[in-house]
Amino acid sequence: MRNVKFYDKDGREVVLNYKDDVDIPNGNHVLAVPVFNDKLLFTKHKHRGIELPGGKVEKNEKCIDAILRELYEETGAIPKKTHYIAQYQIKMKDKSVFLKDVFFIEVSHIENSSSYYETNGPCLYTKIDDIPYEHRSFLIEDAAILHCLERVRELGFY
């Protein structure tokens, strides 16, 4: 598997490893790169702005269950296909490790919800550049996430 090393905007080392469906996700956070009707599915976080769905893995929860839960809670999306595509690790200043598993998800359909938890629900865009800059979460510019979007393209998923 190919890996990429770089430093984030805060000077922390990031190691991104590309994965596939035979690998076992074991992160403490998850991120979805969902596609619905040939568009990227984002969520609008109430404070940060438009970003990809994801979050923390809860105690005794598998990563795949966490990403499907987060995807549904933040967008109402129902998956059709899910693929494990990457994992990245950030070495934090306090020596802890932030480990995020990234999944490509082909969305079957989107259900309306009366609550999207900490978000205002789903948003669809063809590409990141279509999102007005002032509405983007800082996470949209994260190098690890941009590498994962490129990985989705390399795999022919989008």
Image (cartoon, rainbow, N blue to C red):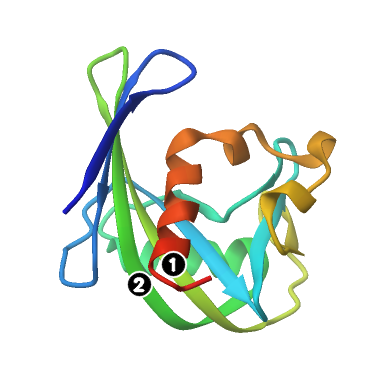
Q: CA distance from mark 2 to mark 1?
A: 5 Å
The residue tagged 2 is 83
Instruction: Give the left or right position of residue 39, taking residue 141 as reference.
Output: right
Location of residue 92 by image quarter: top left
Mark 2 is surrounded, within 10 Å at the Cα level, by few (under 14), some (14 to 19) or many (20 or more) other residues, namely: some
Q: Amino acid at mark 2?
A: His
Q: Is residue 14 above or below residue 100?
A: above
Q: Which of the pair 22/79 is nearer the observer?
A: 22
The residue tagged 1 is 104
Q: Mark 1 and mark 2 in contact (Cβ < 8 Å)?
A: yes
Location of residue 64 by image quarter: bottom left
How far across and down, in percent of the image, does residue 96 sit?
25, 24
Instruction: Give the left or right position of residue 84, taking residue 82 as reference.
Output: left
How far across and down, in percent of the image, does residue 110 sit?
68, 80
Q: Which of the pair 140/29 is nearer the observer?
A: 140
Q: What is the total number of numbered labels drawn onto the structure image? A: 2
Instruction: Give the left or right position of residue 96, taking residue 135 as reference.
Output: left
How far across and down, in percent of the image, does residue 105 sit?
47, 72
Mark 1 is surrounded, within 10 Å at the Cα level, by few (under 14), some (14 to 19) or many (20 or more) other residues, namely: many
At a point 17% along the width and 63% down the height, the residue shown is: 24
Q: Earlier in the sequence, mark 2 or mark 1?
A: 2
Q: Which of the pair 97/56 is nearer the observer?
A: 97
Q: Is residue 132 above or below residue 78?
A: above
At a point 59% along the width and 35% down the height, the residue shown is: 141
Query: Mark number for residue 82?
Result: none
At a point 59% along the width and 53% down the height, the residue shown is: 52
Q: Is residue 20 above or below residue 48?
A: below
The quadrant of the picture occupied by the N terminus is: bottom left
Q: Is residue 15 above or below residue 80?
A: above
Instruction: Give the left or right position of residue 85, taking residue 51 as reference.
Output: left
Q: Amino acid at mark 1?
A: Phe
